[in-house]
Amino acid sequence: MRRADRLFEILQVLRRAKGPLTAAKIAEQLETSRRTIYRDLTALMSRRVPIRGEAGVGYVLERGFDLPPLMLTQNEIEAVVLGSQWVAANADRALSSAAADVIAKIAAIVPKHLKELIDDPVVGTPPGKPPDASIDLSRLREWARKERKLRLRYVDEKRAPSERIVWPILVGYVSGVRVLIAWCELRKDFRYFRTDRMLNIEFLDDTYPERRTTLRRRWEAQLK
């Protein structure tokens, strides 16, 4: 790997990290030596790239630092194309339209020799099942962002009806099925609600008492 490419990859690794990373961890991801990473980090910091940290403790890239917009690798472009294809085929209308816009924007800014990766991609995803027309998935996402409650009339897999107050935290898009992941006041636990089993949704003005990010961390912890 050229040094310029490695410096860029170090910044990418630090941007993805959720906390300090040691030089050893960075070296492991880039398949190089710690000595090389120390030298590269010193070079980046000497160029006033806002990296904080020290040997043996870890390094972080300060928020707000941005990279030039056109520095995309072939793999990164193909990852975006594949993800956008899936969203366009499987998500609700608003997200599908946004995915098409993302592809158009990337096609307009990438260098000419990379345009083929978008115009004639070698990655693809099969078409998905159209989302449930009776459920406003865009508004479900909005209510999760606003941390507001929902009242659901719902039927389970045995077609038994129930009414619940839930705290939406995530709208999941799985091929053929859309689910709302929420805290259920009735069950006092996280539950998955398939949108094709929702009989009615009432969008309440009441906000729920916990932050959505806190709820999501608790839900993710249960999955481990």
Image: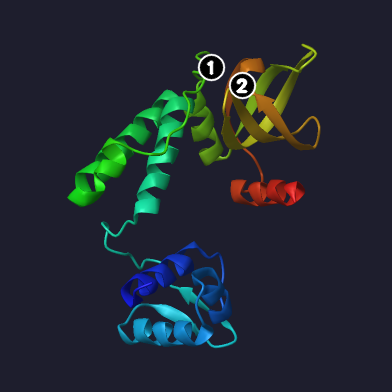
Q: Nearer the viewer, residue 142 or 46?
A: 46
Above or below 156: residue 174: below
Q: Which residue is mark 1?
A: 132
Q: Where is residue 50? Give x, y as percent.
A: 38, 77
Give the image quarter of residue 66: bottom left
State the residue at coordinates (64%, 40%).
208
Is residue 141 in view? yes
Earlier sequence position, callout 1 versus callout 2:
1
Colouring of the image: rainbow
Q: Which residue is mark 2?
A: 195
Between marks 1 and 2, how big is the CA–CA gap? Answer: 7 Å
Q: Where is residue 44? Give x, y as percent.
A: 36, 81
Give the image quarter of residue 78: top left
Three-letter code for the amino acid on which mark 2 is drawn: Thr
In this rendering, position of residue 13 left or right of residue 178: left
Is residue 20 in view? no
The answer to whether the residue labelled 1 contacts the one labelled 2, judged by CB atoms less than 8 Å apart, is yes
Three-letter code for the amino acid on which mark 1 is drawn: Asp
Is label 2 in a helix, a strand or a loop? helix
Is label 1 in a helix, a strand or a loop? loop
Q: Residues within 10 Å of mark 1 (few under 14, many from 20)?
A: some
Q: Where is residue 41? Give x, y as percent.
A: 42, 82
State the residue at coordinates (59%, 20%).
202
Q: Which image quadrant: the N terminus? A: bottom left
